[in-house]
Image: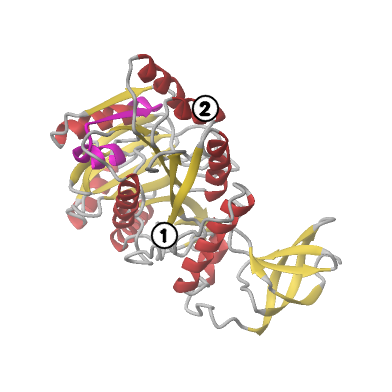
Amino acid sequence: MEKNQIVEVEIVDLSHEGQGIAKVDGRVFFVDNALPGEVIQMRVLKVTKKIGYGKVEDWLKVSPHRNQATNVTYLRTGIADLGHLNYDQQLLFKQKQVQQNIKKIAGIDSLDVAPTLAANAPLAYRNKAAVPIRRIQGQLESGFFRKNSHDLIPIEDFYIQEKEIDALILATRNLLRRLDLKPYDEKEGTGLIRNILVRRAHYTGEMMLVLVTTRPKIFRVEQLIEQLTKEFPHLVSVIQNINDQKTNAILGQEFRLLYGKETITDQMLGNNFEISAQSFYQVNTPMAEKLYQVAMDMADLQPADIAIDAYSGIGTIGLSLAKQVDHVYGVEVIPKAVEDSQKNAQTNGITNVTYVCDQAESAMQNWLDQGIRPTVIFVDPPRKGLTPSFIQSSAQVQPDRIVYISCNSATMARDVKHYQELGYTLKQVQPVDLFPQTHHVEVVGLLEKEGVGQS
């Protein structure tokens, strides 16, 4: 098997990232834009001893579940890496992925994962965009990088972003061209505009534009702001972020307010939230509401409950459930997020919450020392999951229930296994589709302390 060789193969499965899987000569091949049941002519791109990567040269048999309408650009950039699969099948794929992880990693085969909760809107749902700016064939362009590269593909319709965000990106791009502001050149380290970041509040419509630049001075920026705010009345915040480092990180440390206010306001489950340029806020607002509602329903909250909201961010989960319990204790390691959560509590007149800036496991120990005994803990960690020390300390405080919200069912399954060893049993698992057209899925799991709920 050599590079550029063309072989006929059948696609037998999908990988967890949505690539077609073929088996040839004892090797597993991963192929973009290929679905189970399809027979293809595959060009070999790369081969190692056990695995290989291929590309579809031609389809000899096409899956009945293929979405023929998807633009291949979205697959090449990873914007919509499951966009070629019909939506009902995307939901089944996600349920299957979660089920496999719970079985293989957590070692649980007696629990059925619930069907994936479908999105209200499978397209144009994202409330946030971070778009690189580069020069292509002599012209400033906005778009997205080709997968596993820094080659920009110019894009005007981003498919899964709210349409008003796409419109603001295009208008900004056109003005940057007209004002002759120089795009960033990664190799040379020259140019001014690196990225455009746009946030839009789903319910209020308020928009924020962040211009990420390599240096403080932006030539004729007043003209840019005047034109954009005239064209977009909901644009209430324009911020400059300065990133002069040779890095893949989008944002630098320094923010400057150029126009309007520092935050936009949105609603979630009846509460108002102030969202800043760097706030963590779920990118699909209506589905985040469904996600948090599922989590609260699973927790079976009672007025006497003491809840801990670990990884509390700007308070979206804790403030959503505060009205149903006696008290919520939130912990977050980012000082700005803690400040925002305290402000959000004040804005919504919620007084039965306490937010601290600390490592989650350390805060847990402090609360335990103060005699605080939570009955329910909510965790919503980053993709890497929980640390062993957090799992240990959270189990030590002996809550009746732990509600685990995850954006990575593999790390969640690993952590569930650890919780099982500490006397907790996984009772329910519900996938929720916050990211239609992509392989990503949010999951809510309920862990109960052994003996709870038994008469």
Image mark count: 2
Q: Residue furthest front?
A: 455
Q: Is residue 121 left or right of residue 195?
A: left
| Mark linked to residue 55 | none
Query: Mark number for residue 392?
Result: 2
Give the residue at the far left of this rendering: 349
Three-letter amino acid code at the position of disc 1:
Asp
Q: Quadrant of the N terminus?
A: bottom right
Residue 329 in the magenta stretch? The answer is yes
Which of the two residues, 104 or 152, is positioned nearer the viewer here? 104
Picture coordinates of residue 415 (x, y %)?
55, 39
Residue 255 visible in the displayed image: yes
Residue at image x 13%, y 34%?
349
* Secondary structure found at label 2: helix
Q: Which disc, if any, is residue 433?
A: 1
Taking the spot 51% from the left edge, 43% from the top edge, the residue there is: 383
Image location (x, y in percent) of residue 213: 41, 38
